[in-house]
Amino acid sequence: MKVLVVDDSGVMRKIIARSLGACGVTDVLEAGDGREGMEVFSSEEFDLVITDWNMPEMTGLELLKAIRSSGSTVPVIMVTTEGEKEKVVEAIQAGVTDYLCKPFEQDELRDKLDKYVAV
């Protein structure tokens, strides 16, 4: 299983990668913003994308829209502090697969992985 983690916080990328590793996922690529994330996404095949919402250059929502407009149906999980109803609806309309609110527990991430991909 290959996962792309997109977050402008290097610390958060490492936390997510470490949590994925504890869930048995070792093939993890990282990107520091949505623009870089789309470049990496376009160059490789992924089983899952985990992205932050608020990032410079290209937000997670813009990344999600770009992924969906490319024709991809890969599961995309938004990891964010953006929990307002309007934001959730906007992401659902754009094709987000699921949400994970910061801060999250490793078990929550494992539950999402179990729902959308075979680990």
Image (spheres, grey):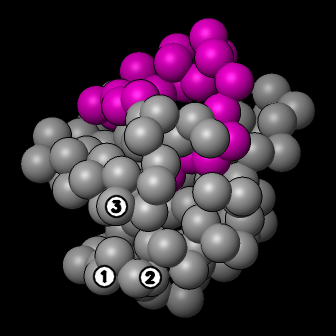
Separation (CA) of disc 2 from disc 3: 12 Å
Mark 2 or mark 3, earlier in chain: 3
Relative to 21, is 110 on the left or the right?
right
* Residue furthest out toward the bottom: 85
Q: Nearer the viewer, residue 31 or 19?
A: 19
Q: Is residue 38 magenta?
A: yes
Say which of marks 2 and 3 sits in front: 3
> Badge 3 is on which residue?
22
Q: Position of residue 42 (x, y in %)?
A: 64, 16
Tell me the SS state at disc 1. Answer: loop
Relative to 82, is 32 on the left or the right?
left
Q: Nearer the viewer, residue 93 or 6?
A: 6
> Badge 1 is on which residue?
105
| Amino acid tagged 2 | Glu
Say which quarter of the image contains residue 97.
Answer: bottom right
Residue visible at 69% across and 24% down in the picture: 45
Residue visible at 34% across and 76% down in the picture: 106
Tell me the SS state at disc 2. Answer: helix
> Badge 2 is on which residue?
108
* Disc 1: CA contacts within 10 A as few (<14), some (14-19) or many (>=20): few
Residue visible at 36% across and 31% down in the picture: 30
* Disc 2: CA contacts within 10 A as few (<14), some (14-19) or many (>=20): few
Number of numbered discs: 3
Which quadrant is the C terminus positioned in?
bottom right
Verify CB contact (< 8 Å) between mark 1 and mark 2: yes
Which residues lie in the magenta part? 29-50
